[in-house]
Amino acid sequence: MKTLTITRPDDLHLHVRNGAVLKTVLPHTARQFARAIIMPNLKPPVTTVAQALVYREEILQAVPAGVDFTPLMTLYLTGSTTVDEIEKAAASEHVHAFKLYPAGATTNSDSGVADIKAVYPLFAAMEKHDIPLLIHGEVTDEACDIFDRERVFIDRYLTDIAKNFPGLRIVLEHVTTTEAVQFVQAASAHIAATITPQHLLFNRNALLAGGIKPHYYCLPIIKREAHRLSLVKAATSGNPKFFLGTDSAPHLSSLKETSCGCAGCYSAHAALELYAEAFERVGALDKLEAFASFYGADFYRLPRNSGSVTLEKTTWTVPPVYGENGLSITPLGANEELSWKLKAAA
Ligand code: DOR
Ligand code: ZN
């Protein structure tokens, strides 16, 4: 059987929630990834180091016995974040970044930043203390077409942030457009991007053609084919600025299959398999290891993982749902066949 063995990877953008959902989804991530950058958009959001440490403990409780998994915590940036908190975060061994959500851009972003210029002093503090800024790069302007919101954010905000804070490490999260790829390629080595499996595998037809399919709805929204091709090219180019971040974002099936469904694709159940699918389609499986296991760790200045994971070339069908005791989460690719399957962590 054809197999692919790579260094144990990291997921540099992950939502695991809390409570019963956390217990359902975390084992899926921990069986393949050694570490993950944990998003802080809980209700209420994780805004302080003290809260992040409590959340970290809850996550560790959900790691199955005998599995080695390290959550890398982030703090949710608000208009009320203090320079003191940034100093504390930078000094903490468990907090690795701040996340900027423009207020109203996505799930649980109400407490996000309404006036980006007003938090420039906070960006200055992050630059000084060398803690990365992770950005959900979409404008929230009602008048801006949803398919243009990333491109406009880059023009209206990100270009200026990059210019004013040249030493600040920035990750433009879950890039979805040719313009975002070009921006990151042209920027300094301090600016990188994560790419999700859904944006590599699907274009907006998956969401909207032949019936509306809510499990393909996430933010930033999946774009047209030309953008998908740009993302595949970036991910498989061997450029260390582009690395793996699933943005796996579980929502209960009932909250997605409704007249106003939540944004987020649940991909942690088969994250590496989905990326392998995308890389193999363009004959670039040899580029998967660095994208999944090296470039993200290097950007965050973490040691690369030891140990390995092995994928086997074998067809399997993704279950329709995950969860028990009435909890139901529909995974990305539900009922579809995948051609790679994770074997075991060594
Ligand atoms: O689709 C998304 N879901 N995009 C985000 O930015 C947030 C995420 C979530 O938390 O559900
Ligand atoms: Zn996210």
Image (tube, grey):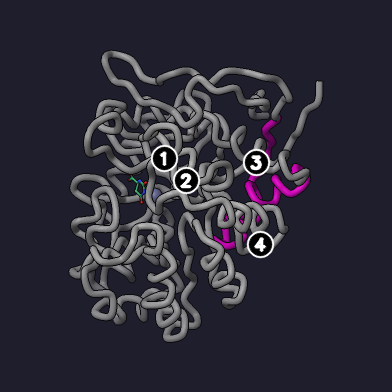
Mark 4 to mark 1: distance in Å? 33 Å
- Secondary structure, mark 3, is helix
Tell me the kind of residue under disc 3. Ala
Crowding at dot 2, Cα within 10 Å, few <14 / some 14-19 / many 20+, comes out as some
Q: Would you say the residues marked 1 and 2 are in contact, meaning their CB atoms lie under 8 Å apart?
A: yes
- The magenta-colored residue range is 285-310
Q: Does the numbered disc 2 mark a residue whose Cβ is under 8 Å from ligand 1? A: no
- Camera sees residue 297: no
Residue 168 image point, x, y percent: 46, 76
Residue 126 is a magenta residue? no
- Secondary structure, mark 1, is helix
Snapshot quadrant of residue 110: bottom left
Mark 2 to mark 3: distance in Å? 16 Å
Where is mark 2, residue-wise?
Answer: 204
Which residue occupies the foreground of this view, 209 or 223? 209
Question: Quick one: label 1 or label 3, which is nearer the N terminus?
Answer: 1
Tell us which disc is closer to us: 4 or 3. 3
Residue 289 is a magenta residue? yes
- Side (left or right) of 200 relative to 120: right
Question: Quick one: label 4 or label 1, which is nearer the N terminus?
Answer: 1
Q: Residue at x 39, y 71 (%)?
A: 152
The label shown at residue 278 is: 3
The label shown at residue 240 is: 4
Q: Residue at x 32, y 58 (%)?
A: 75
- Quadrant in which the N terminus is drawn: top right
Which residue occupies the foreground of this view, 274 or 176? 176
